[in-house]
Amino acid sequence: MELMFALVIGTLTATGVYLLLRARTFPVVVGLTLLSYGVNLFLFSTGRLVTGQQPIIGSAEHYTDPLPQALVLTAIVIGFAMTAFVVVLSLRSLADHDDDHVDGRRDERPVRQLDETEANGQ
């Protein structure tokens, strides 16, 4: 179980970093989301991956730490608010610059010039 959990965390983190390095807005937002999911799962795994154990020290031989669960719940709320803010920020940038590149540079494509017959509609 621990190996599968570690592979899932590694896959989410690697995919999130790969998408963060893209030059478009939507992959960057998805990459941030996947990276936050990977961090949340990592924080959750620090409280031990056991089922059916009590979260109180001293009442049982083995216990589960409840603090990582509280941290993950807080991180989910903060991550959702941050994702909403980044989406609104990217939509505003798209509306202002007519481009969704993250670095702000446009593709340098030559613009075709219209000759006088095309410009006059003939």
Image (spheres, rainbow, N blue to C red):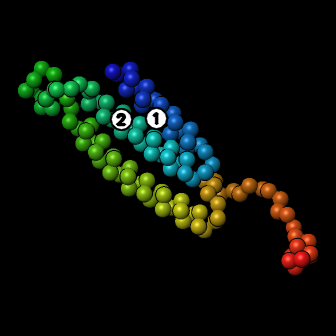
Instruction: Give x and y (percent) for residue 22.
Output: 61, 45
Q: Is residue 30 above or below residue 117?
A: above
Q: Mark 2 is on which residue type?
A: Leu
Residue linked to disc 1: 12
| Type of amino acid at the residue the image marks with label 1 | Leu
Residue holding disc 2: 41
Tell me the quarter of the picture where residue 104 sits: bottom right
Q: Position of residue 1 (x, y in %)?
A: 33, 21
Q: Position of residue 43 (x, y in %)?
A: 33, 35
| Gap in angstroms between the C-alphas marked 2 and 1 | 10 Å
- Mark 2 and mark 1 in contact? Answer it, CB < 8 Å: yes
Q: Is residue 11 left or right of residue 51?
A: right
Crowd tier of the residue under label 1, counting other residues whose Cα lies within 10 Å: few below 14, some 14–19, many 20 or above: many
Please tell me which residue lies in front, 5 or 74.
5
Question: What is the quadrant of the C terminus in the image?
Answer: bottom right
Residue drawn at the location 35% of the way across and 51% of the way down: 78
Looking at the image, how many numbered discs can be counted on the residues? 2
How many C-alpha atoms fall within 10 Å of the one at disc 2: few (<14), some, or many (≥20)? some
Seen in the image, is 50 located left or right of residue 7? left
Residue, x 55% and y 47% (percent of image)?
A: 27
- Residue farthest along the left direction in this orientation: 59
Q: Quick check: 64 above or below 93?
A: above
Residue drawn at point x = 21 percent, y = 26 percent? 51
